[in-house]
Structure formats: structure tokens, C-alpha cells
């Protein structure tokens, strides 16, 4: 039995209407980093507006595979997916 922390895939809406997709072990801290300009390079030039939601994965591998799959979706498809994600 593993005591590994779960990983989270999350979506952020940016000011230009684009959707950023990322993974983390702490959604709140990672979103705060994006807001402060210390997150991903992408969100430094595409300012984050809103955390659209997240989904839980049992490990990094699973979260990374989901991230890769979701990054291939259009913004419309990502918004549709976001409607089914957990929101805080």
C-alpha cells in the first residue's frame, strides 16, 4: 500500500481567453504561484483570471498522461471538460 500524495490536473482561464493546463500536488499553492508570476512561463504572458477546476489522479504518471491528452483539446473542448471538474 502506497502513501503517495495524489496529483491534480487543473485548468486556468487566462485573460486572453486561452486555457492553461497543468499538474501539481497542491492546486491552491500552484494557482497562487501563477497569480504571482512565479508559475509557468505561459501564465506570465497570458495572465490567469480564474481557476476553472481540477481532477484528482493517483500518481504523477496518470496526471501527466491526462495533461498531454487535454492539451490537445481546443479551448471550447477544454471549457466543456472544465464544467465537469471539481471547483473550490
Image (cartoon, helix red, strand yellow):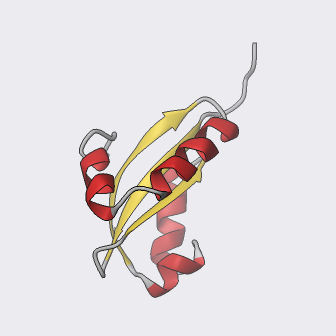
Number of on-image labels: 0
Residue 3 horizontal/vertical position (percent): 73, 23
Q: Is residue 33 above or below residue 67?
A: below
Toward the top, the furthest residue is 1
> Horizontal placement of 59 versus 21: left or right?
right
Toward which corner of the image does residue 75 lie, by quadrant?
bottom left
Residue at image position (44%, 39%) is 55
Left-right relation of 83 to 42: left
Front-most of 10 and 32?
Answer: 10
Asked whether 2 or 32 is in front, the reply is 2
Q: Residue furthest bottom?
A: 45
Q: Nearer the viewer, residue 6 or 22?
A: 22
Please tell me which residue is depicted at 58% across the width and 73% down the height of the picture: 40
Q: Considering only vertical position in the picture, is 29 above or below 65?
A: below
| Residue 56, position as x, y percentages in the image | 49, 35
The image position of residue 51, as x and y in percent, is: 35, 59
Q: Residue at x 62, y 36 (%)?
A: 62
Residue 52 position by quadrant:
bottom left
- Which quarter shows the N terminus? top right
Establish if 87 lies above or below 45. Answer: above
In the image, residue 58 lies at what x, y percent? 61, 29
Q: Nearer the viewer, residue 46 or 37?
A: 46
Amino acid at each position: 500500500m502506497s502513501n503517495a500524495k495524489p496529483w491534480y490536473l487543473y485548468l486556468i482561464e487566462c485573460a486572453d481567453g486561452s486555457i492553461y493546463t497543468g499538474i501539481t500536488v497542491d492546486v491552491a499553492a500552484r494557482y497562487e504561484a501563477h497569480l504571482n508570476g512565479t508559475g509557468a512561463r505561459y501564465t506570465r504572458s497570458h495572465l490567469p483570471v480564474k481557476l476553472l477546476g481540477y481532477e484528482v489522479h493517483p500518481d504523477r504518471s496518470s496526471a501527466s498522461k491526462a495533461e498531454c491528452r487535454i492539451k490537445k483539446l481546443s479551448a471550447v473542448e477544454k471549457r466543456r471538460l472544465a464544467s465537469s471538474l471539481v471547483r473550490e
